[in-house]
Image (cartoon, rainbow, N blue to C red):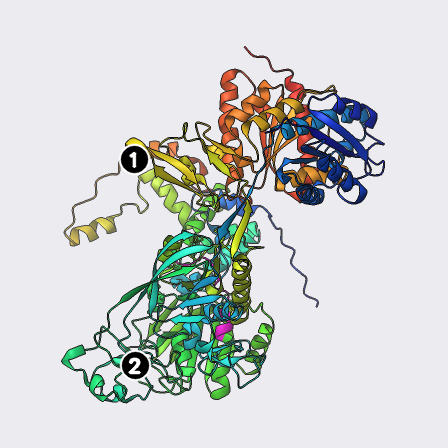
């Protein structure tokens, strides 16, 4: 590496900053710093002529490090790095600081003190710049192929989007038929038309692809180029990294050849085995060889392994005209190479039999909404007639019970969000078909928050559907007549009611799919406290996970209605496409590196890394060392803060850079107040410092800010070093404990602060000299207040006296 | 609209007073679903007690009304509501907490005061009477021994029970 020749470019923002800071003094100061070969002053340096000045200096080889003091560092940093790179210098040899928001404006009442602080800031930037190292780019493969897990409406829509964008898509569905919950639900709000339609694929040549929607079975879904549908299949293993996964899928035998079956139904007519039809809520029976409905997709029969007598019978084999029945089929495993994975495993109805007072599973006429949906469906087991399952007679008095197992701290504390609408939909559908049905909905709160949803509630009231505000305490059955009695308090009348009913429908909670936990383990992603897949950020990254290559959509993250599921599916598809579209992942290697000479055998960093980027690999004699994946590492430094022996460093912020900045920031005081070092993260913490300056909130100039990627990098040693370097007080400024941009960095910093306080106490230094603050951008006032408070506190404590 | 609107005093922090008492911690979980009311055997036979309403009034800060209208003393402690409450409000225990607050302010129905005083003076809630002795003899049960009144008094004194109870003859 050549000797560092630092060019320092100081912007005065059209004289705004030089009105406060003594620029002549600053420039003279900087000129005398060792290693500085060029100092320039202009109004601004991040665009136009100013930027050209930097480019020219780089091109002429006068400088090989760039320090820029700018007013808007976040924007200017990007523009300057890009220009510097084009001029032939590594963009990571640039250091940008903000003399306006971090110095001139907050300290405008004390210009002399501000100038002294500016000197310290410039010195720190130059000292850091001298130690910066070039960071190269690396390329990783991104296979343009996507695995979609789950063949409900979410998975189908995401798969279709991606296949039509040209990606190879593998759609894996655990059931023998696609459709998920939609296939059973019959009709969806808010349109009340069939649940099982999807967006129109362009593969359909006969109609305009931009029609609003298409039945799945008529959509030509299977004919979409690049789409590989794997029904009756399950993901059993995933290896590799984002962009390049090896996925093992196990295909259960269907016992019917998909390419030969012509759906003639002869097999079912000869099959002697009858079993309860689970798809139809056991309201009828089906054969051991079956399809759910004539309109299923794929339109291929399947044999129920548990029911079929196989070679003891084999009547279907004999009768099949195309020899499609293949009883000899065995499970097979196939390996797929994909660049990213979309989880679309949906949700399911909660089994309400745990709620003993409702007697589900015990009284046949207590059913769930999905079971009711099968009755409402004209293709269903009752051909659209609503009956009492106990005697198959029409049900004329129906009571709906809301919030069964949801909003219930005993089972599922959350609101399942769609059950109110499902009840309103089913009640109005039944009432339209059979106006003489007496329908009562017992509710705690009716929640109709979506577009057009309140109209369902209006319509239901207009149709004479009754609403009782009150959650039933028990459902009883008259043993003589089988009539059900629902005990409920009408809270508005303050009267206890006993509602007689032929049929009671439980609006049960919607819970994660059974395999969610297993799949989360296979994929290495997290579930939330309710067991749903956890998104990276609930507000801004609803379909992404912490792992770059894995995306989520639909009910896998929370119960959703169809419109939200569609939105989610398209979003996940776009995110996956954006990730893979270049066929490669290019990233700057701003990553952590391990010094293997120091590293050994502890398991702190692999556990602490928020991105699962660290693994332990064997060394000689049974020892292990940490290995950091350059692809997965996001460069936050949480591992650095965790490593007990200092074996991990960030390439973009080496320990000597931190030490040099610390020393420089505390080298010049120039105020009458004790020096305080604020170590801030580069996310919310730094934003709070920015915004306090931008809004011209004042705090004293003795407070100096040192930026690190995440406060998770802070070691107890850093804090002690700050005191050693002359700080009389130390502030750690990070994100909110639950809002850290790298998961738990600020929580870890908090623990370090607590530990450091104990150590300080042992050294005879008042622990009050150290404090952690959790701030966000809109809390600039709180940063200024914290800076003032710490100054006052440390002033009262006086100079540190070591025993 | 001749009817005069009744002004009621609201104690804004009543819920905090309740949650700080043993058994009262869960009162704020309540979302007024009414499961307790329709589970309650007492509410089935009288309008004077409705557990949902007791909690509602308490959460609205109607301290005076909750502590004096007598409803809290009608709970039979069957715990049916507590078993079924979807928000895990410990309803029967909340009612105990409310009773404790009421007693500490001298709000106790006569019948309970009599029980308490019997306990203090005789060591039993139900005093031994000739009638009882005879009944026991009829059932073949041995005669009751006198209660260990001295040690009981020590316990009642240590717990402060004797101080919160109105003395005999005092009107609560």
Front-most of residues A456 and A140: A140
Q: Tell me which segment is drawn in magenta.
A: A411-423
x and y percentages locating residue B148 in the rendered image:
26, 35
Residue at 62% x, 51% y: name it: B9
Quarter residue A452 falls in: bottom right
Can you identify the residue that label 1 sits on? B149
x and y percentages locating residue A161 in the rendered image:
52, 69
Quarter residue A463 falls in: bottom right
Residue at 54% x, 35% y: name it: A651
- Chain letter, disc 1 residue: B
**Residue A290: numbered disc:** 2
Extreme residue toward the top, this view: A803
- Chain letter, disc 2 residue: A
The answer to whether A705 appears left or right of B53 in the picture is right
Q: Secondary structure at mark 1?
A: helix
Q: Is residue A430 visible?
A: yes
Front-most of residues A97 and A712: A97
Q: Quadrant of the N terminus of chain B?
A: bottom right
Residue at 65% x, 38% y: name it: A89
x and y percentages locating residue A621 in the rendered image:
28, 31
Q: CA distance from mark 1 to mark 2?
A: 79 Å
Compared with B30, A126 (above or below) is above
Front-most of residues A585 and B42: A585
Compared with A578, B21 (above or below) is above
Residue at 53% x, 15% y: name it: A764
Magenta-drawn stretch contains A327 = no
Q: Do residues under tags 1 and 2 come within 8 Å of each other at their CB atoms?
A: no
Q: Main secondary structure of the magenta part?
A: loop
x and y percentages locating residue A392 in the rendered image:
32, 85
Label 2, residues with CA under 10 Å away: few <14, some 14-19, many ≥20 = some
Q: Secondary structure at mark 2?
A: strand
């Amino acid at each position: 590496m050549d000797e560092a020749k630092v060019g320092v470019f100081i912007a005065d923002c059209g004289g705004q900053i030089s009105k406060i800071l003594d620029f002549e003094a600053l420039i003279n100061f900087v000129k005398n710093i060792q290693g500085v070969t060029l100092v320039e002053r202009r109004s601004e340096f991040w665009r136009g002529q100013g930027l050209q000045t930097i480019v020219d200096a780089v091109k002429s080889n006068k400088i090989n490090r760039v320090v820029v003091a700018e007013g808007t560092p976040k924007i200017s940093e990007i523009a300057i790095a890009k220009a510097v790179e084009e001029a032939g210098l590594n963009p990571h040899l640039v250091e940008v600081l903000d003399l306006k928001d971090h110095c001139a404006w907050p300290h405008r009442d004390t210009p002399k003190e501000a100038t002294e602080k500016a000197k310290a800031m410039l010195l720190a930037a130059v000292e850091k710049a001298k130690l910066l190292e070039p960071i190269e780019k690396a390329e990783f493969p991104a296979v343009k192929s996507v695995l979609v897990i789950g063949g409900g409406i979410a998975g189908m829509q995401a798969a279709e989007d991606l296949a039509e964008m040209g990606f190879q898509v593998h759609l894996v569905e655990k059931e023998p038929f696609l459709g998920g919950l939609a296939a059973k639900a019959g009709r969806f709000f808010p349109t009340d038309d069939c649940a099982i339609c999807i967006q129109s694929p362009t593969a359909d040549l006969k109609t305009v692809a931009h029609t609003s929607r298409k039945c799945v079975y008529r959509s030509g879904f299977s004919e979409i180029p690049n789409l590989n549908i794997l029904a009756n299949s399950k993901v059993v293993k995933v290896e590799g990294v984002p962009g390049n996964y090896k996925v093992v899928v196990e295909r259960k035998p269907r016992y019917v050849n998909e390419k030969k079956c012509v759906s003639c139904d002869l097999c079912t007519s000869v099959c002697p085995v009858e079993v309860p039809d689970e798809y139809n809520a056991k309201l009828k029976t089906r054969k051991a060889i079956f399809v759910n409905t004539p309109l299923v997709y794929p339109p291929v029969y399947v044999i129920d392994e548990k029911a079929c007598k196989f070679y003891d019978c084999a009547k279907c084999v004999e009768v099949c005209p195309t020899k499609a029945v293949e009883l000899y089929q065995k499970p097979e495993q196939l390996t797929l190479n994909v660049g990213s994975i979309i989880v679309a495993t949906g949700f399911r109805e909660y089994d309400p039999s745990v709620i003993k007072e409702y007697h589900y599973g015990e009284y046949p006429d207590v059913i769930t909404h999905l079971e009711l949906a099968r009755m409402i469906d004209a293709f269903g087991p009752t051909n659209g007639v609503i009956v009492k399952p106990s005697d198959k007679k029409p049900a004329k008095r129906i009571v709906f019970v809301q919030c069964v197992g949801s909003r219930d701290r005993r089972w599922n504390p959350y609101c399942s969000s769609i059950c109110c609408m499902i009840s309103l939909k089913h009640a109005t559908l039944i009432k339209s078909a059979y106006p003489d049905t007496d329908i009562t909905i017992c509710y705690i709160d009716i929640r109709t928050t979506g577009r057009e949803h309140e109209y369902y509630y209006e319509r239901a009231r207009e149709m004479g559907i009754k609403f009782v505000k009150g959650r039933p305490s028990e459902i009883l059955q008259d043993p003589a007549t089988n009539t059900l009695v629902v005990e409920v308090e009408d809270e508005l009348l303050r009267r206890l009611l006993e509602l007689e009913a032929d049929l009671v429908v439980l609006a049960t909670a919607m819970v994660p799919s059974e395999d969610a936990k297993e799949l989360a383990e296979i994929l290495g992603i997290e579930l939330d406290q309710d067991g749903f897949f956890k998104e990276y950020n609930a507000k801004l990254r609803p379909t992404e996970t912490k792992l770059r290559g894995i995306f989520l959509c639909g009910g896998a993250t929370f119960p959703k209605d169809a419109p939200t599921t569609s939105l989610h599916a398209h979003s996940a598809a776009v995110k996956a496409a954006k990730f893979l579209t270049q066929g490669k992942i290019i990233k700057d290697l701003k990553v952590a590196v391990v010094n293997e000479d120091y590293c050994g055998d502890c398991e702190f960093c692999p556990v602490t890394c928020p991105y699962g980027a660290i693994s332990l690999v064997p060394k000689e004699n049974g020892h292990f060392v940490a290995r950091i994946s350059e692809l997965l590492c996001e460069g936050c430094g949480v591992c650095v803060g965790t490593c007990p022996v200092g074996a991990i460093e960030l390439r973009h912020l080496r320990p000597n850079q931190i030490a040099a900045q610390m020393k420089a920031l505390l080298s010049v005081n120039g105020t009458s107040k004790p020096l305080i070092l604020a170590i801030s993260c580069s996310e919310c913490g730094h934003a709070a410092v920015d915004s306090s300056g931008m809004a011209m909130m004042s705090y004293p100039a003795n407070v100096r800010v040192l930026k690190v990627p995440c406060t998770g990098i802070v070691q107890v040693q850093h804090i002690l070093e700050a005191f050693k370097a002359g700080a009389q007080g130390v502030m750690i400024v990070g994100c909110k404990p639950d809002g850290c941009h790298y998961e738990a960095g600020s929580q870890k910093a908090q623990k370090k602060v607590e530990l450091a306080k104990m150590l300080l106490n042992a050294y005879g230094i008042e622990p009050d000299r150290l404090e952690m603050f959790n701030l966000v951008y809109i809390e600039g006032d709180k940063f200024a207040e914290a800076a003032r408070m710490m100054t006052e506190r440390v002033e009262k404590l006086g100079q540190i006296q070591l025993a | 609209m001749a009817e005069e609107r009744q002004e009621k005093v609201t104690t804004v922090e009543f819920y905090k007073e309740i949650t700080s008492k043993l058994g009262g911690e869960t009162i704020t979980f309540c979302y007024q679903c009414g499961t307790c009311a329709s589970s309650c055997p007492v509410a089935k036979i009288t309008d004077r007690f409705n557990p949902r309403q007791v909690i509602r009034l308490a959460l609205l800060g109607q301290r005076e009304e909750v502590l004096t209208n007598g409803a809290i003393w009608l709970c039979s402690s069957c715990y049916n509501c507590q078993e079924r409450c979807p928000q895990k409000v410990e309803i029967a225990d909340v009612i105990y907490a409310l009773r404790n607050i009421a007693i500490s302010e001298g709000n106790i129905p006569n019948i309970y005061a009599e029980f308490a005083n019997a306990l203090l003076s005789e060591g039993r809630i139900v005093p031994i009477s000739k009638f009882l002795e005879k009944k026991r003899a009829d059932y073949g049960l041995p005669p009751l021994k006198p209660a260990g009144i001295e040690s009981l008094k020590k316990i009642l004194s240590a717990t402060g029970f004797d101080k919160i109870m109105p003395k005999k003859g005092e009107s609560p």
